Image (cartoon, rainbow, N blue to C red):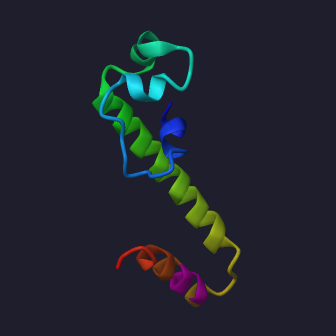
Amino acid sequence: MPRLLLRRPSRRQVPARVASPSTKKSSGRSGFYWHFADRAELIAATLELWEQLATTETIDRIQSIPDPRERLTALAAGAYAGAA
């Protein structure tokens, strides 16, 4: 279910109700509570997954750069790309 939230058009919009993400699948709310105690736990799991995916992508991207200075430059550029 965290992957479903990460595929949403705007990752800034988290469903206000537990039923929102579960309606995309046929499991309903009972399926949701099988995996998560509450909405906060779902959000925490989604953020953890996003962090893992973003970290892995960053590592994969900069690992292919042989020069350490260029690697550091690419890492810094990626970190500050969305900060404006």
Q: Quick one: quadrant of the C terminus?
A: bottom left
Q: Above or below — where is 70 with respect to 12?
A: below
On screen, residue 62 above or below 42: below
Q: Does 15 appear above or below 56?
A: above
Left or right position of 19 against 65: left
Task: Assess whether residue 44 is covered by the magenta stretch.
Answer: no
Image coordinates for residue 79, horizontal then vertical, percent: 44, 74
Tell me which residue sits at (36%, 36%) in the image.
15
Of residues 83 and 61, the one nearer the viewer is 83
Q: Which residues are magenta?
A: 70-74
In the orientation shown, which residue stands out farthest toward the top?
Answer: 30
37 lies above or below 68: above
Q: Main secondary structure of the magenta part?
A: helix
Q: Residue at x 35, y 38 (%)?
A: 44
At a point 38% along the width and 31% down the height, the residue shown is 42
Residue 53 screen position, x and y as percent = 55, 52
Estimate the x, y position of residue 19 in percent, counting from the top left: 39, 22
| Quadrant of the image occupied by residue 20 | top left
Identify the residue at image location x=53%, y=36%.
4
- Count up the numbered dots: 0
Front residue of 16/42: it is 16
